[in-house]
Image (cartoon, rainbow, N blue to C red):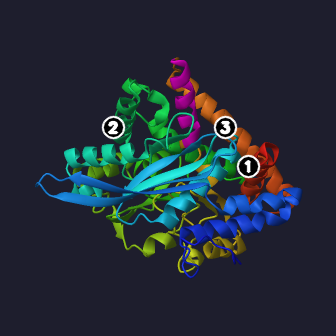
Amino acid sequence: MHTDLPSYLNADDLGPWGNYLAQVDRVAPHMGELNKWLETLKRPKRILVVDVPVHLDNGTVAHYEGYRVQHNLSRGPGKGGVRFHPDVTLSEVMALSAWMSVKNAAVNLPFGGAKGGIRLDPKQHSVGELERITRRYTSELSGFIGPNKDIPAPDVNTDARIMAWMMDTYSMNQGGTVTGVVTGKPVELGGSCGRQEATGRGVFISTRETCKRLGLELKGLRVAVQGFGNVGGTAAQLLADAGARIVAVQDHGGAVYSASGLDLALLQAQHRAHGSIADTPNTEPLGRDAFWQVPCDVLIPAALEGQITADNAAQITARVVVEGANGPTTTQADDILQAQGVTIVPDVLANAGGVIVSYFEWVQDFSSFFWTEAEINARLEHIMLGALDAIWRLAQDKRVSLRTATFIIACQRILTARDMRGLYP
């Protein structure tokens, strides 16, 4: 129950932020003396809402609403992506920034949590319009971000090119090149090898290690994946390479199924040609609701938040759910899946590979010394394995879910930093 909510929130409809608050409440009994600081986790440190005016190609001026939320900076500068999507809301960006705080602390990176977004549909804009929108948004954030303040990265509908524009705009305003202001940049501009595949690789590692602990062989394992972009596509390919069968894939355009396993090369070709895997030859089409009922061993939701709900959770047949997306499972759905005996590897652990390699990129930019992709992947695996092992042991010791165990470790780290720093003035 949250009786003292910030005035800018609607108590009747908290959206994704309400989901996050419910997750925090579940770890309160485990915080001990740190409970006095728990309210810190329920209030973002800073929220910036900006108007983003831009000249469109047709000569008119359009205005878009942009956000940047810094949830917590106790452990270091803010870190989190920027998304371009027509459904972006303040509640969503707040929740995503908070999950970044938890994620960074869970894998013990020296970052706080932040997130940004612009409410627009990038598919409705030319490359020139997107560049002008990005640069104006970055300019509005110029006093808010920086390599020691807050470091944006790619997210939904943003990529290395968007990051290059953000870095260039910030650098021009600073009077010199500042590569470390963003991560996920092109390698030619100080980006890191392995960054593009990092989130999907982390999902693969999480899936592999969880199945190993549950006694499930990867060879022949039936996997269903929602989302076929950077995260879902990479995870699917790595799992297929390890012998798993990708039996179903869903993206924004539709879903396809094959009991014997989908041909990922065919799916990738269809996606490149048509922007979706829908109607891929030699596959069985699936309805949007039918996707959740597909017989499988592992389900990987790697699209947007709020996809697994109380309406479809009971239909899921998977023994393991590995959250490639941020916040894909509502609190009610989480309870239903737990009651069914499903092991859920939470987003704040499973998809941490992206921010781990973003951390590597940030470190490399400061030193101007860059590592090979093999070194990047080895370091990523080392951190993921250490975090997963600690979380798994805590979950076993306390008889709690992996999500609760992840939040316990992360929130203890964040609140310990808050306690040690004290309040100023």
The circle on residue 165 is 2
Q: Is residue 366 magenta?
A: yes
Q: Residues within 10 Å of mark 2 (few under 14, many from 20)?
A: some
Q: Amino acid at mark 2?
A: Trp
**For mark 1, what is the residue?**
414
- Residue 354 placement (x, y as % from top left): 53, 42
For this view, does 2 lie left or right of residue 195? right
Q: Give the Cα distance between marks 1 and 3.
A: 10 Å
SS category of the residue bearing label 2: helix
- Tell me if residue 334 can be seen: yes
**For mark 3, what is the residue?**
110
The circle on residue 367 is none
Q: Is label 1 in contact with label 2 (beta carbons under 8 Å)?
A: no
Locate the N terminus and report the quarter of the image it occupies: bottom right
Disc on the earlier residue, 3 or 2: 3
236 and 386: which one is in front?
386
- Residue 324 placement (x, y as % from top left): 53, 54
Q: Amino acid at mark 1?
A: Ile
Numbered range of the magenta stretch: 355-368
